[in-house]
């Protein structure tokens, strides 16, 4: 079951995530890996069943990150240069595609879950 879940995450990261048009809120806010990357690590280290509470917690953290970004966005003026940064991370129109070879952080080449550069 773990191998199937990891394979599905791999397919998501390679084929779906780059096309969805927005960044993972957790990854954009904390620059500490996307949810799919972190869930894959949980499954690798603990398995789905033993890691289930950690997986659920990751999605709670992502939801909280989204709310934090939304609140910060309310209090920040939108930049005129239309660059994707943590406060605009989920705004499809302001994301700039990031080639996989330029992925930052702990992500390996070709394993980038963030489809845009969300750095300042």
Image (cartoon, rainbow, N blue to C red):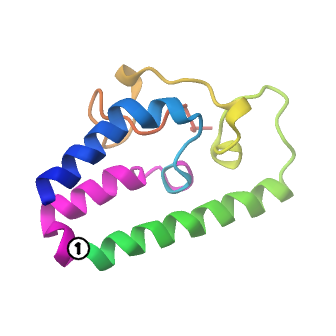
Mark 1 = which residue? 51
Answer few, some or many: residues within 10 Å of disc 1's Cα (few below 14, many 20 plus, some between 14 and 19).
some
Above or below — where is 108 with respect to 50?
Answer: above
Percent of width and height locating residue 14:
33, 32
In this rendering, would 44 be left or right of 26?
A: left
Q: Quadrant of the C terminus?
A: top right
Does 36 appear in magenta? yes
Q: x, y (%) of residue 21?
A: 59, 34
- Expressed as whole percent of the image width and height from the top left, the position of residue 109 reads 28, 27
Residue at horizontal 46 percent and vertical 31 percent from the top? 18
Magenta-highlighted residues: 28-51
Q: Secondary structure at mark 1?
A: helix
Q: Picture quarter containing residue 80?
A: top right
Residue shown at 47%/38% (left/top)? 114
Q: Taking 86 as reference, is 102 left or right?
A: left
Q: Give the position of the N terminus as an image quadrant.
A: bottom left
**Secondary structure character of the magenta stretch overall:** helix
Residue 59 among those drawn in magenta: no
**What's the residue at 26%, 40% (across, down)?**
10
Q: Residue at x 71, y 31 (%)?
A: 94
The spot of residue 43 in percent (x, y) is 20, 62
Q: How many marks?
A: 1
Where is residue 5, by image quadrant?
bottom left
Q: Nearer the viewer, residue 114 or 81?
A: 114
Query: Viewed as shown, does residue 45 lie left or right of 118?
Result: left
Instruction: Identify whether 71 is placed above or below 106.
Output: below
């Amino acid at each position: 079951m773990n191998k199937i879940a990891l394979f599905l995450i791999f397919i998501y990261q390679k084929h779906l995530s780059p096309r969805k048009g927005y960044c993972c809120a957790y990854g954009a806010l904390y620059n500490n890996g996307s949810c799919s990357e972190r869930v894959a690590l949980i499954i690798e280290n603990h398995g789905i069943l033993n890691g289930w509470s950690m997986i659920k917690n990751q999605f709670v953290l992502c939801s909280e990150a989204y709310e934090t970004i939304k609140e910060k966005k309310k209090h920040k003026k939108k930049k005129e240069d239309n660059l994707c940064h943590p406060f605009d991370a989920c705004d499809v129109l302001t994301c700039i595609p990031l080639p996989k070879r330029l992925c930052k952080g702990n992500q390996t080449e070709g394993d980038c879950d963030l489809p845009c550069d969300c750095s300042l």
